[in-house]
Image (tube, rainbow, N blue to C red):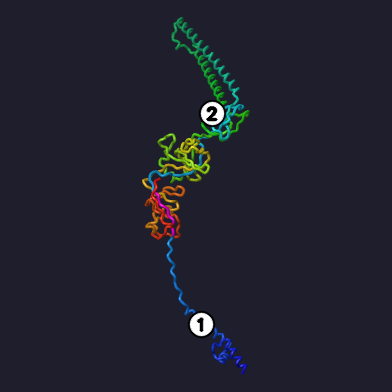
Amino acid sequence: MEPERKLERKTRHRGGAGLPARLWSRLAGWQQGVFVLAIGVIGFSAMYWLRPSATELVPPRQIPVVTTRPVEIGEGAIQVRGSGTVRASAETTVASQVGGRVVWVAPEFVSGGRLARGEPLFRIDPADYQNALAAAEADVAQRSVGVLEAEEEVALAREEYSRLARREGLDPDPVNAAALVLREPQLLAARAALRSAEARREDARLALDRTWVRAPFDGIVRTEAVDIGQFISPGQAVGQLYATDVVEVVIPFSDDEAALVAGLWEARSSRPETRIAARIEAEFGGRRFEWAAHVDRAEAALDEETRTIDVIIRVPDPFVPTPGQPDRPPLLIGAFAIADIEGARYDRYAVVPSAAVRDEGVVWVVESDTLLAMRPVQIIQRVEDRTFVLGDLAPGEPVIISGLPFVTDGMTVRVAGGLETAGGADR
């Protein structure tokens, strides 16, 4: 009996699930496995179908946040801005027209030295040229005597012809006499020799004067290569000098930018009525300084590489401070400068941040504090981070400068920090 009880307890432990021990023991092994698997499937199905249902949560609607800036309204002439490099309006190579040994050099004739027009730079030894002038003057004196002698001989020949005409019954008028009889060719030759001698004297005088090499204009020495005792030949370059009374700034403009400057192609410095006002700005020592200027001309051909039009701006007195800027430095050659040129005039235009202009002609505007509206605009020009446009924009109207993942006309937006509004500003 004890073994049977142990077998019954063992059978119940293995998963008889309440079946009688004898019934469970009569099942084959595979039948027991199928039975256990079926019980598991039924239990899993019951748990699946009796599970609690999930609650669906609808996320709250997200309204995009945007950043805005107010629109500025202006009228009148706009300023067409460009940038370029300062260059000399006139630059020359210093050279002597005569050769010889250098006997004197001006202290100011050094790199960076400033010289006034007509001020001497250096001098060639004048001894040879002084001697040549003396010889030429002596030749002139000698030729002058020859002319006097020839004139006297002509006078004597006329008297002799008159006496001969009266004696022989000839025409007494000397005009009808032969030129050789009156010795007129000899007089002409003597006068020609005198003029030649006078010309040689002027050449000698010019050569002596050219032993002084002088500054052709008010300028600054860029380079110099001459010293006392040096022998130089005629035409030998010994330095460079650039003018300081006027400098030029070359501004490359696209054809759209150049079209904004009214009268650009007629502008000439020699005709004040055609000049176009401009302003030059340049930085020095962390500060920005200004110079009054005007458009001199525009190149008549596009740059082959950049496809731009070079506009030449002339800046008078670039090295002279003004009462308004007593500490203004010189406008140095090679410096980078910004130019504002008076452009076309408009009855009304708007100024918006450049970041607000989308797709080359659309601005997003916030209407009624929450609605995004798309406004088409016509771009006039861009100046740094500001864009001048024509379009239906009101003073102080907020335009969106931040980006959005998707945009539709009339969508709801929320302005970060509240709307930023301001009155229009005339520029």
Tell me the chief SS of the magenta region.
Answer: strand
Q: Would residue 113 be visible to someone looking at this image?
A: yes
Residue at image location 61% in from the left, 30% down from the top: 227
Residue 237 placement (x, y as % from top left) = 58, 32
Residue with the most extreme top position: 167
Q: Which mark is residue 321?
A: none
| Quadrant holding the C terminus | top left
Q: Residues within 10 Å of mark 1 (few under 14, many from 20)?
A: few
Circle 2: residue type: Glu
Q: CA distance from mark 1 to mark 2?
A: 116 Å
Residue 204 placement (x, y as % from top left) = 56, 22
Q: Which mark is residue 119?
A: 2
> For the magenta stretch, what is the residue range?
65-72
Identify the residue under disc 1: 43
- Magenta run includes residue 70: yes
SS at badge 1: helix
Residue 196 placement (x, y as % from top left) = 53, 19
Q: Residues within 10 Å of mark 2 (few under 14, many from 20)?
A: some
| Quadrant holding the N terminus | bottom right
* Label 1–label 2 contact, CB within 8 A: no
Marked residue nearer the N-terminal end (1 or 2): 1
- Magenta run includes residue 351: no
Circle 1: residue type: Gly
In the displayed structure, 166 sits above or below 141; it is above
Residue 113 placement (x, y as % from top left) = 56, 33
Residue with the most extreme bottom position: 1
In the displayed structure, 156 sits above or below 244; it is above
The residue nearer to you, when weighing 422 against 10, is 422
SS at badge 2: loop
> Looking at the rendering, which quadrant does residue 109 occupy?
top right
The residue nearer to you, when weighing 299 against 364, is 364
The residue nearer to you, when weighing 231 against 228, is 228
